[in-house]
Image (tube, rainbow, N blue to C red):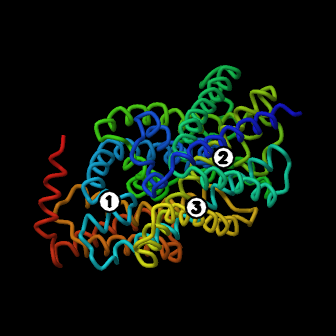
């Protein structure tokens, strides 16, 4: 048997076994959605990073670097994400962990908003759940597209067959083990992703003679590849191979940096903060996540993409295949198999988290709230599992178009969550005067702006206007309308006083 195929099979068997083991540990909805808040700092750190980066880290971002070098999107996205993630860990993680436990042990983001703002109408919870489901369909689809490209590039499979196989694998262990299966597999997958990018980038740099030689060769192709302020066009289909496209401009740089704002509103990342077993372990988890799960993968992905430019004699038709093709050219089949398993790890680690958060929105925020208020814990777990299947099926239909871009799908969903929930999370945690009506207005304005902004034709990333307008709506409605109750203010003071 081909070593690469054998490596994949072994890896997949391990993931399914984790799902089977954690199936026996999942008895309540809290277990299924948050793992019973039992995650240690190492699992939390790698799980947060792995569920964050997805297949776009090993497919989308290297593809952007392959097509444009340091310019256009790639470098500035990496800078924005690094800053955003560090701020998120530094300021949001601990306070969110404390607040969600104080507010009747909230286990989902919509439930947290409802309890935080004492929303007896449940409107805040419903609106939040609707936006989560809408944007996660696109996010999940991006991961399935990435998985299809992996199987397509590695095994020369038909795209639609590859898409179906990848979806079945991911759904299998998510269906069985829920959050514990997702988190423990994410720990393995996050470590594997970091190692793959670190190993590949260092090995490639040593082989060509270091950074100096890399930039020298890229500069000979076109100077814009090594200019962070210049754009580069690339399209093999149209005969355009790394042609300078002028300056990026302020709008392009701001749009790329704005990716960092998205961290504050990503439900699948915030769920890791909520699930750590104690807020006192956040500091250790932050150090692990930022160093091993953030800096190394992000900048390793950029280097891998640029190494691909000078490695292949025949330019790639699909720039997002660069990591997949590079490891098969550079390494022997056994090493290539391990590194390609890292791509699958990246894809699986985010799609499983997205499926889980979406299923929790259906089971906790719709089913129990409106259909079966007295449903047993076992019943809710099974509703969550069935929801995983339904959401995955819809995401497969969205991903069915084989010309779909991983980075474009991720960018849209990332902006959706960042603008919809980011300001609401920040204000709920750090401004005691935030009101229920302010939170509702912020979520609605942020989400609707992201949906409508593309119609303006502006090149500005929808995250920017969405985040700004959402923040303005929260402040305006909180100051003008009915403010927070005394109970809410006392709770805020109590939570913010916890050391």
Secondary structure at badge 1 equals helix
Of 192 and 40, the residue lying toward us:
40
Image quadrant where one finds the C terminus: top left
Residue marked by disc 2: 59
At label 1, counting other C-alpha atoms closer than 10 Å, the crowd grade (few under 14, some 14-19, many 20 or more) is many
Quarter of the rendering containing residue 399: bottom right
Residue marked by disc 3: 385
Circles 2 and 3, Cβ within 8 Å, touching? The answer is no
Image quadrant where one finds the N terminus: top right
Secondary structure at badge 2 equals helix
The answer to whether residue 101 is left or right of residue 408 is left
Residue marked by disc 1: 425
Residue 99 % position (x, y): 26, 54
Name the residue located 31 percent from the left edge and 75 percent from the top edge.
Answer: 441
Residue 340 % position (x, y): 72, 38
Name the residue located 70 percent from the left edge and 33 percent from the top edge.
Answer: 339
Of 182 and 448, the residue lying toward us:
182
At label 2, counting other C-alpha atoms closer than 10 Å, the crowd grade (few under 14, some 14-19, many 20 or more) is many
């Amino acid at each position: 048997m081909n070593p690469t195929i054998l490596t994949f099979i072994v890896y997949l068997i391990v993931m399914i076994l984790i799902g089977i083991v954690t199936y026996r540990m999942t008895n309540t909805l809290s277990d299924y959605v948050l793992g019973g808040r039992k995650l240690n700092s190492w699992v939390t750190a790698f799980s947060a990073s792995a569920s964050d980066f997805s297949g776009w880290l090993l497919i989308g971002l290297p593809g952007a670097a392959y097509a444009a070098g340091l310019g256009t999107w790639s470098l500035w996205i990496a800078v924005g994400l690094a800053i955003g993630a560090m701020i998120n860990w530094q300021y949001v993680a601990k306070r969110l962990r404390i607040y969600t436990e104080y507010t009747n042990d909230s286990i989902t983001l919509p439930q947290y908003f409802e309890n935080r703002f004492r929303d007896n109408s449940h409107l805040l919870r419903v609106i939040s759940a609707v936006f989560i489901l809408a944007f996660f369909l696109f996010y999940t689809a991006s991961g399935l597209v990435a998985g299809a490209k992996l199987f397509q590039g590695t095994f020369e499979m038909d795209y639609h067959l590859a898409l179906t196989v990848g979806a079945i694998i991911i759904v299998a262990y998510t269906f069985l083990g829920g959050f514990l299966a997702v988190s423990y597999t994410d720990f393995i997958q996050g470590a594997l992703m970091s190692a793959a990018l670190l190993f590949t980038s260092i090995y490639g740099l040593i082989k060509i003679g270091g950074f100096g030689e890399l930039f020298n060769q890229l500069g000979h192709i076109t100077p814009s590849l090594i200019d962070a302020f210049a754009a580069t066009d690339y399209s093999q289909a149209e005969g355009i191979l790394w042609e300078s496209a002028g300056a990026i401009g302020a709008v392009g740089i701001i749009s790329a940096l704005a990716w960092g704002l998205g961290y504050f509103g990503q439900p699948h990342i915030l769920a890791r903060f909520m699930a750590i077993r104690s807020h006192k372990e956040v500091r250790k988890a932050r150090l692990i996540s930022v160093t091993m799960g953030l800096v190394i993968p992000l900048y390793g992905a950029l280097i891998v993409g640029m190494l691909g430019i000078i490695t292949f004699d025949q330019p790639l038709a699909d720039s997002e295949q660069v990591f997949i093709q590079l490891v098969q050219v550079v390494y022997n089949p056994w090493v290539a198999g391990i590194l390609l398993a890292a791509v699958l790890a990246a894809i699986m680690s985010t799609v499983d988290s997205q499926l889980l958060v979406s299923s929790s929105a259906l089971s906790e925020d719709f089913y129990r709230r409106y259909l079966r208020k007295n449903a047993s814990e076992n019943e809710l777990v099974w509703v969550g599992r069935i929801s995983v299947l339904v959401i995955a099926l819809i995401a497969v239909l969205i991903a069915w178009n084989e010309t779909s871009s991983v980075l474009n799908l991720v960018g849209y969903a990332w902006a959706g969550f960042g603008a919809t929930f980011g300001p609401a999370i920040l204000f709920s945690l750090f401004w005691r005067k935030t009101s229920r009506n302010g939170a509702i207005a912020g979520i609605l304005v942020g989400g609707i702006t992201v949906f409508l902004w593309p119609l303006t034709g502006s090149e500005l990333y929808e995250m920017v206007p969405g985040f700004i307008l959402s923040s303005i709506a929260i402040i305006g409605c909180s100051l003008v309308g009915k403010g927070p109750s005394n109970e809410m203010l006392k709770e805020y003071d109590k939570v913010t006083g916890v050391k």
